[in-house]
């Protein structure tokens, strides 16, 4: 037997897939039958990239001018979303999917854009509750909702869902206003939307 030590850290940031991700990947993989025809096939195939090659944290794709554009997000060594993925990860993805693509498909692997959002929320709080406690509980509910492990790339954010979540917090009578802001500069990405 042999033993080795990896002198560089793992690349990409994806951990073990959840049960839901395995179900989705299995159905997508069966439909693709060891080839990539649609954008969904390519995305499914990239999600199956073995971790030793630097599997990305998130991947999405689209067709633009008759070429398949794949967009990847990775995590840095601190577990935060990185605005740039390693060229090694992108090259490994391109090499891995090359054997599954038709000869006439042109593939482009790009970094995805990170969009940082901030929300300002006005709540109507029941006077019999401690307003500070209601505020802390509301913030915790929003943090849990926006946990990046629960989101996929390109997934829309619905204000109505935020309102429903906040209304479930004990002490919240109503959500009177929600404002959404795109944060940029400093510790945030420079992507504006």
Image (cartoon, rainbow, N blue to C red):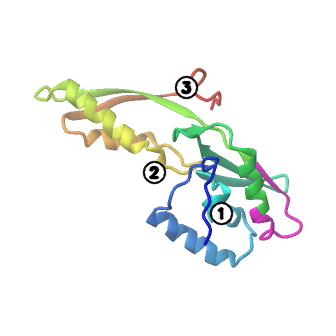
Q: Residue at x 54, y 51 (%)?
A: 152
Q: Residues within 10 Å of mark 2 (few under 14, many from 20)?
A: few
Q: Which residue is mark 3?
A: 183
The vertical placement of 164 against 54, above or below, is above
Q: Looking at the image, is mark 2 or mark 1 earlier in the sequence?
A: 1
**Is residue 100 shown in magenta?**
yes
Label 3: state its secondary structure.
strand
Instruction: Say left or right for 71 vs 134.
Output: right
Q: Which residue is mark 2?
A: 150
Residue lying at the far top of the rendered structure: 186
Q: CA distance from mark 1 to mark 3?
A: 32 Å
Is residue 49 or residue 147 the one in the foreground? 49
Q: Which residue is mark 1?
A: 49
What is the quadrant of the N terminus in the image?
Answer: bottom right
Residue stretch rendered in magenta on the structure? 96-109
What is the quadrant of the C terminus in the image?
Answer: top right
Residue lying at the far left of the rendered structure: 128
Is residue 123 or residue 3 the one in the foreground? 3
Is residue 49 or residue 66 the one in the foreground? 49
The vertical placement of 35 against 193, above or below, is below
Q: CA distance from mark 2 to mark 3?
A: 21 Å
């Amino acid at each position: 037997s042999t033993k080795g030590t990896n002198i560089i850290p793992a690349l990409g940031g994806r951990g073990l897939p959840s049960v839901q991700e395995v179900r989705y990947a299995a159905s997508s993989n069966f439909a693709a039958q060891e080839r990539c025809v649609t954008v969904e096939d390519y995305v499914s195939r990239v999600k199956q990239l073995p971790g030793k090659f630097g599997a990305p944290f998130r991947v999405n794709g689209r067709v633009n001018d008759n070429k398949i554009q794949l967009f990847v997000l990775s995590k840095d060594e601190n577990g935060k979303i990185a605005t740039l993925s390693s060229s090694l990860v992108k090259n490994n993805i391109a090499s891995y999917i090359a054997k599954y693509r038709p000869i006439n498909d042109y593939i482009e692997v790009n970094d995805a854009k990170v969009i940082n959002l901030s929300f300002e929320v006005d709540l109507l709080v029941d006077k019999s509750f401690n307003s500070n406690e209601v505020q802390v509980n509301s913030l915790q509910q929003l943090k849990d909702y926006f946990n990046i492990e629960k989101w996929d790339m390109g997934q829309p954010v619905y204000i109505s869902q935020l309102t429903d979540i906040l209304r479930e917090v004990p002490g919240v009578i109503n959500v009177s206003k929600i404002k959404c802001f795109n944060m940029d500069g400093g510790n945030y990405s420079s992507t504006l939307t």
